[in-house]
Image (cartoon, helix red, strand yellow):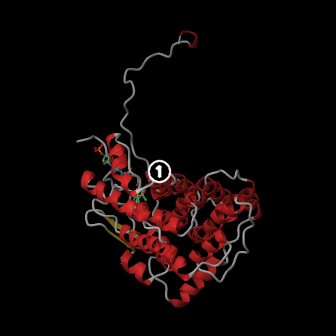
Amino acid sequence: MSEYARGLEGVIANESSLSNVIGNIGELSYVGYHIDELVKNCSYEEVIFLLHHNRLPNQSELTAFEKGLRSDRNLPQQVIDFLKSAPKEASPMDVLRTAVSMLGLYDDRAAIGEPDLDKNAAIALSLCAKSATIVAAFHRFRSGQELPEIREDLTEAQHFLYLINGEVPSDTAARILDVALILHADHGMNASTFSARVTIATLSDMYSAITAAIGTLKGPLHGGANEGVIHMLKEIGDLDKVDEWVEGKLSRKEKIMGIGHRVYKVLDPRAPHLRRLAIQLTEELGEPKWIKMSERIAEIMRERKKLEANVDFYSATVYYSLGIPTDLFTPIFAISRTSGWTAHVLEQLRDNRLYRPLTKYTGPKTLSPVPPIASR
Ligand SMILES: CC(=O)SCCNC(=O)CCNC(=O)[C@H](O)C(C)(C)COP(=O)(O)OP(=O)(O)OC[C@H]1O[C@@H](n2cnc3c(N)ncnc32)[C@H](O)[C@@H]1OP(=O)(O)O
Ligand SMILES: O=C([O-])CC(=O)C(=O)O
């Protein structure tokens, strides 16, 4: 057995009452509510409240909570100016990371020496509200369009689609995005949440923690995999090319995006929800090709590697079918996960201890004198 847990596999790093990921049976719950229940009965806003207050809101609490979020959607002019001047070809995840970091410059509440929980809770909600505006504004500006007027009469899902498309979405499209936001909100000690908690544990600030988390999420082994799935499907091109393509990848020991998970040893419980939506949308669009290809890839991976689809596998087809540009897929994940990241930051602050693991030193053991520079 290894002397250390490579990639921290199996290591319990902290306690959390936010989400429970049960890998061997493929079950996920937030604060004691199964995601199937939350998808069926709740909105994304109720889930943000749940993660931030450790309980579901009643109607008047929800109305007040939604009002607070909706009134916090505007960005400082300096951030708008940055989004207008950022290179059009920049990755939206890099732009989101930079803009979130920038928000910290214009928020006096962030410049606190003490981990004030009320101030941090207010910043947390502000970030949940503003992250969608950042992503949509950059998308509009890079496409040579203005940002539509910020509205307060639309849900988070409706408002994001309204901002990127310039028109209020259908109820179906908004509900589909709402479900996707619910499913991505939190997931135990995943890499980006861990980044956020490591950062805040030094008593840094909320903006730094979320900036770190966004930078961590963008990698293709984590949230970036959803964009990788669409690139993969486009590269394969057709159902009858899938087998050969996947075999080629496996023989070169390359990863198939959207497949496999560190914790789930069975199907990711979010995947069936997204699969159902992907089937519904591709049928409606008369474009079943993507989902048929996805199903075949999943089948081969199950048979050949005993690996199952993860959350990123079908979300890609859902977003694609909603007409969302591919490079906004991971930012949408980040918008939703901001609710979980910020809840974890608050939880960390409530019972903080610095993270400081050890490393197994593998460098030279014998100490040599430093040779004069001219003789090196
Ligand atoms: C929201 C999320 O973050 S969900 C995950 C999103 N990421 C992806 O979809 C990227 C593709 N998947 C992967 O890279 C991995 O499955 C991870 C990173 C998610 C989990 O990886 P780990 O637990 O570290 O497993 P690891 O990478 O060590 O793989 C173990 C074995 O399974 C194989 N494997 C795991 N995932 C895949 C995959 N997607 N395609 C092909 N082989 C895979 C590895 O090659 C390795 O095989 P080997 O033992 O023969 O060398
Ligand atoms: O838990 C993980 O390692 C990755 C994941 O599925 C998530 O962050 O949603």
Q: Nearer the viewer, residue 86 or 313?
A: 313
Residue 121: x and y in percent read: 57, 71
Q: Residue at x 41, y 79 (%)?
A: 38
Ligand 1 contact, mark 1 (Cβ < 8 Å): no
Around disc 1, counting alpha carbons within 10 Å, would you say few (fewer than 14), some (14 to 19), or many (20 or more)?
few
Is residue 332 visible in the rendered image? The answer is yes
Would residue 189 be found to the left or right of residue 127 on screen? left
Q: Residue at x 35, y 43 (%)?
A: 248
Residue 317: x and y in percent read: 46, 64
Q: Residue at x 38, y 39 (%)?
A: 359
Would residue 201 be found to the left or right of residue 265 on screen? right
Is residue 353 visible in the rendered image? The answer is no
Within the image, what quadrant is residue 269 found in?
bottom left
Question: How many numbered markers are drawn?
Answer: 1
Q: Which residue is mark 1?
A: 235
| Callout 1 secondary element | helix
**Residue projecting furthest to the front:** 240
Q: Nearer the viewer, residue 269 or 73?
A: 269
**Residue projecting furthest to the left:** 1
Residue 353: x and y in percent read: 45, 56
**Residue projecting furthest to the bottom:** 60
Residue 328: x and y in percent read: 57, 61
Q: Nearer the viewer, residue 349 or 100?
A: 100
Up-down: is 157 above or below 62? above
Q: Amino acid at mark 1?
A: Glu
- For the N terminus, the image quarter is top left
